[in-house]
Amino acid sequence: MKKTIEMVFRNAGNKEIVLYVPSPREDLTLAQVQPVMQDIIAKNVFDTSGGDLVQVVEARVRITDTTSLA
């Protein structure tokens, strides 16, 4: 089983942009992730084709399980 944090932002072009962080800590909370997302916006860390990141949309954990076909 593989876990990934997905941080979802909206850019100036009104498109959703997702940043993926693999292998998050098990005890990570929304209260810990939200300030980081706000900091990413405030410091203008990433450039997107639709402009600057302007809004936090959501943070979520994606869990995937891969099984090979026999």
Image (cartoon, rainbow, N blue to C red):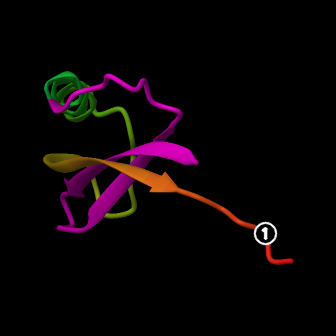
Residue 35 vertical placement versus 51 (above, below):
above
The residue shown at (23%, 33%) is 37
Image coords of residue 62 (percent x, y): 41, 53
**Viewer-nearest residue: 25 or 8:** 25
Q: Residue at x 18, y 32 (%)?
A: 30
Foreground residue, 49 or 3? 3
Residue range corresponding to the magenta coloring: 1-30
Q: Is residue 12 left or right of residue 40?
A: left
Amino acid carrying mark 1 in the image: Ser
Q: Is residue 44 left or right of residue 5?
A: left
- Asked if the stretch drawn in magenta spans residue 20, the answer is yes
Q: Which residue is mark 1?
A: 68
Residue 5: x percent and y percent?
39, 42
Going by the picture, which residue comes out furthest to the bottom? 70
The quarter of the picture where residue 13 lies is: bottom left
Mark 1: secondary structure? loop
Count numbered badges in the picture: 1
Q: Residue furthest right?
A: 70
* Position above or below: 44 against 2: above
**Image position, residue 59 (x, y; %):** 24, 45
Across and down, in percent, residue 44 comes to 28, 33
